Image (spheres, rainbow, N blue to C red):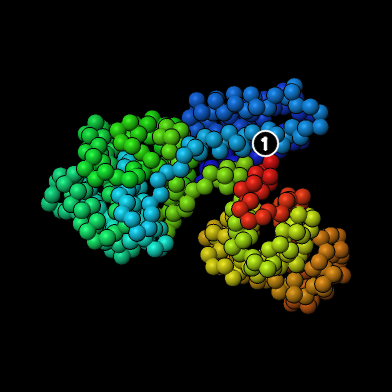
């Protein structure tokens, strides 16, 4: 996705600033201009970008910063905070509660992925123990009911709709009523989308909303709509009480920056993103990890959560202690590979662990990646304790490498490749040096530290 390019451009701009010996007004301006350009090219609305630039300049007053302050860190933190601010409207959206009936209405233009997303949303909650149901109140598009029916049947989710009734308000009301009686706790109403923002669409939407009294209205937006995102989102917000946004097709070539604009326009958070046509290509959206990744900082908060999930409880304090001392040894790498192989869906875990995602684990090649990890582990099995516990790659001289290759039945080239991988990861993970080991519930404070 093109957002990765945006991330690349922003982190390059930050890197250039880091390379400068003195950080003065010019260096700061160059950096901000570079970031502005990158954001605009990614279809973030002009006004948002301008405001962000002004805010950063207000926060980072170079004259007031006494010598000794780490200006680079302060600037990076300000950029991080401002991007988070754009994406985080400050209030969470309504979240349905298990066992208590909630009605959630989906709105959006035709083709935005609304119907697909309704099912993904239902399926996601079903897996987590909800009892969802789908109501097709789209009587405008021929085939809409069939599509919903097909998806719902596949996911074994009850559905309601009609081939003959043409009044969407009536269908919506009947469907909601039926599923309330059947004790479904998450009733999802799909509404009509039109090609463009027609008055009739908005009026119909308003009526369905009035009749079903949804607890939450979700605006579905195709990430490829570009600069039109802000106006489109705002038009919807003006007609119904949009409370959350889902951005679809983030897997494609879309620039994705429209997501930031949609949040600003609706003052509602993005809660999920769609990353493919399939039912489970749907991810919870979290602002801080997203921005961290965008800025090339690695997703430290997600990472800490994952450490808690992936690493057995009794190993956690020791691992954090070692990382805080800056000792990313081959043994740590070995143990992480081991933990990860036990975890199941590799892609998901890897996308969280800094450094592991794109290079070691390209998307769609999980089997190969798994085989690679196992191969690396066989080679590490031929290492001595001294080698495994050292964080000094220089220890690995030619004769050691030859011995490891012989011992594991691998080529010298492969051992060297593994060492390169280790060095790459060690470099990324060395950012953990000096980390304060968090107590329970202090994860977010930690992620702030790491992002600083
Ligand atoms: P609606 O008219 O808004 O209800 O849109 P649909 O749900 O019919 O989706 C339109 C097209 O977009 C379909 O071909 C979907 O498979 C596709 N689609 C929906 N969400 C995603 C997504 O996250 N990624 C990709 N690649 N395609 C999607």
Q: Secondary structure at mark 1?
A: helix
Q: Quadrant of residue 130?
A: bottom left
Say whether residue 271 is left or right of residue 18: left
Which residue: 22% across, 34% down? 203
The C terminus lies in quadrant? top right
**Residue 47 spot, x, y in % from top left:** 50, 25
Outermost residue, left side = 164
Query: What percent of the width, then of the height, locates residue 32?
Result: 64, 28
User: Residue 441: horizontal and vertical position, in percent?
Assistant: 61, 53
The residue singled out by tag 1 in the image is: 76
Looking at the image, which residue is at 40% across and 34% down? 266
Q: Does residue 258 appear to the left or right of 160 in the view shown?
A: right
Viewer-side residue, 312 vs 346: 312
Inspect this view and state whether residue 410 appears: no
Q: Is residue 75 left or right of residue 245?
A: right
Q: Is residue 21 above or below residue 216?
A: above
Q: Which of the 4 image quadrants contains residue 357? A: bottom right
Q: Residue at x 81, y 66 (%)?
A: 389
Locate residue 376: give its quadrant: bottom right
Q: Residue 393: x, y in percent?
A: 82, 60
The answer to whether residue 48 is visible is: yes
């Amino acid at each position: 996705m093109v957002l990765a390019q945006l991330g690349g451009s922003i982190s390059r701009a930050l890197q250039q600033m880091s390379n400068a010996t003195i950080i003065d007004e010019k260096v700061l301006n160059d950096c901000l201009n570079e970031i502005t350009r990158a954001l605009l090219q990614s279809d973030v609305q002009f006004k948002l970008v301008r405001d962000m630039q002004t805010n950063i300049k207000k926060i980072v007053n170079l004259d007031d910063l006494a010598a000794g302050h780490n200006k680079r860190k302060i600037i990076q933190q300000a950029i991080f905070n401002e991007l988070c601010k754009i994406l985080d409207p400050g209030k969470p959206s309504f979240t349905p509660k298990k066992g208590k009936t909630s009605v959630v209405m989906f709105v959006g233009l035709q083709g935005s992925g609304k119907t697909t997303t309704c099912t993904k949303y239902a399926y996601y909650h079903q897996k987590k123990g909800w009892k969802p149901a789908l109501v097709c109140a789209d009587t405008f598009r021929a085939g809409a009911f069939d599509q919903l029916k097909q998806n719902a049947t596949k996911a074994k989710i009850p559905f309601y709709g009609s081939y003959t009734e043409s009044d969407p308000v009536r269908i919506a009301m009947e469907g909601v009523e039926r599923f309330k009686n059947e004790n479904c706790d998450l009733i999802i109403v799909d509404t009509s989308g039109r090609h463009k923002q027609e008055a009739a669409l908005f009026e119909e939407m308003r009526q369905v909303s009035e009749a079903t009294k949804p607890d939450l209205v979700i605006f579905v937006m195709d990430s490829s709509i570009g600069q039109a995102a802000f106006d489109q989102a705002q038009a919807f917000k003006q007609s119904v009480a949009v409370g959350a946004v889902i951005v679809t097709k983030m897997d494609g070539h879309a620039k994705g920056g429209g997501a930031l604009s949609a949040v600003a326009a609706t003052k509602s958070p993005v809660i999920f993103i769609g990353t493919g046509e399939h039912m489970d290509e749907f991810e919870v959206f979290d602002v801080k990890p997203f921005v961290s990744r965008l800025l090339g900082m690695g997703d430290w908060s997600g990472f800490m959560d994952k450490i808690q999930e992936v690493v057995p409880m009794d190993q956690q304090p020791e691992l954090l202690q070692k990382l805080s001392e800056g000792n990313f040894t081959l043994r740590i790498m070995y143990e992480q590979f081991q933990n990860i192989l036990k975890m199941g869906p590799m892609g998901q875990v890897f996308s969280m662990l800094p450094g592991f995602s794109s290079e070691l684990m390209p998307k769609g090649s999980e089997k190969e990646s798994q085989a690679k990890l196992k191969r690396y582990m066989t080679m590490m099995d031929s290492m001595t304790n001294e080698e495994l516990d050292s964080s000094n790659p220089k220890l690995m001289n030619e004769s050691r490498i030859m011995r490891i290759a012989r011992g594991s039945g691998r080529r010298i080239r492969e051992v060297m490749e593994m060492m390169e991988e280790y060095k790459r990861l060690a470099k990324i993970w060395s950012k953990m040096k000096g980390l304060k080991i968090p107590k329970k519930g202090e994860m977010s404070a930690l992620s702030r530290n790491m992002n600083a």
